[in-house]
Image: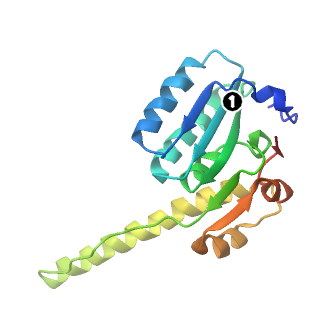
């Protein structure tokens, strides 16, 4: 895999342009553009987002990972512009650190997944226990998935997983140059 740092001119005409919430509509747009670029050996994915659905971000990321595994000579690069919050950072974590770039002044935001759910406990006691256990398992699985993304994000950086876990609950914002200094991205263009 080519890990040569790229000049700003390499980002002149991104093959994939995405902005807005990370949702099913973005995924559909992403797949359409990604499929149209399937014959390119060099693909830039440009994104600006205030966040969205982390599972959609993971689906897009898995598409990147899978394509990269199928053709290791193909270089797929992330370019974040303006704001890469939440699910956008999750998506970015699927790119090799050497293929992560941000424009000047871009902000990353890393936070824990959020849940909004009411737990209604009513009925026979054994059924109530099953309901509570199911909710607990959902939380535990979500935390595990979240932490896998955090672990991918910090590979090759000076940030360790414990630091992300400590800072994520209060929304960790990083300016592009700070992200570069910490080794979370390759460069700022």
Q: Position of residue 14 (x, y in %)?
A: 67, 26
Q: Nearer the viewer, residue 177 or 69?
A: 177
Q: Nearer the viewer, residue 69 or 119?
A: 119
Q: Position of residue 142 (x, y in %)?
A: 46, 63
Q: Residues within 10 Å of mark 1 (few under 14, many from 20)?
A: many
Q: Nearer the viewer, residue 183 or 62?
A: 183
Which scheme is used to colour this image of the protein?
rainbow
| Residue 9 in the image: above or below residue 92 | above
Residue in the picture at 49% in, 53% down: 54
| Tag 1 residue | 44
Instruction: State left or right for residue 155 relative to residue 115.
Output: right
Local secondary structure at mark 1: strand
Q: Position of residue 184 (x, y in %)?
A: 77, 54
| Residue 127 in the image: above or below residue 57 | below
Residue 93 visible in image? no
Q: Position of residue 32 (x, y in %)?
A: 48, 24
Q: Which quarter of the image is occupied by the C terminus? A: top right
- Could you say which quadrant of the image residue 135 lies in? bottom left
Residue in the picture at 15% in, 81% down: 122
């Amino acid at each position: 895999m080519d890990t040569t740092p790229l000049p700003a001119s390499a980002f002149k005409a991104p093959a994939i342009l995405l902005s807005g919430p990370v949702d099913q509509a973005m995924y559909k747009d992403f797949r359409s553009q990604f499929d149209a670029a399937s014959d390119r050996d060099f693909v830039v994915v440009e994104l600006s987002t205030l966040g969205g659905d982390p599972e959609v971000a993971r689906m897009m990321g898995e598409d990147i990972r899978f394509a990269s595994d199928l053709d290791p000579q193909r270089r797929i690069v992330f370019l974040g512009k303006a704001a890469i919050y939440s699910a956008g950072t999750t998506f970015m974590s699927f790119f090799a650190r050497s293929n992560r770039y941000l424009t000047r002044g871009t902000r990353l935001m890393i936070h824990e997944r959020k849940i909004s759910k009411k737990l209604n406990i009513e009925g026979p006691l054994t059924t109530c226990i099953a309901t509570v256990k199911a909710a607990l398992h959902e939380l535990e699985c979500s935390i595990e998935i979240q932490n896998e993304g955090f672990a991918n994000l910090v590979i090759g950086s000076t940030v360790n997983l414990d630091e992300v876990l400590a800072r994520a609950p209060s929304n960790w914002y990083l300016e592009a140059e700070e992200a570069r200094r910490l080794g979370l991205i390759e460069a700022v263009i």
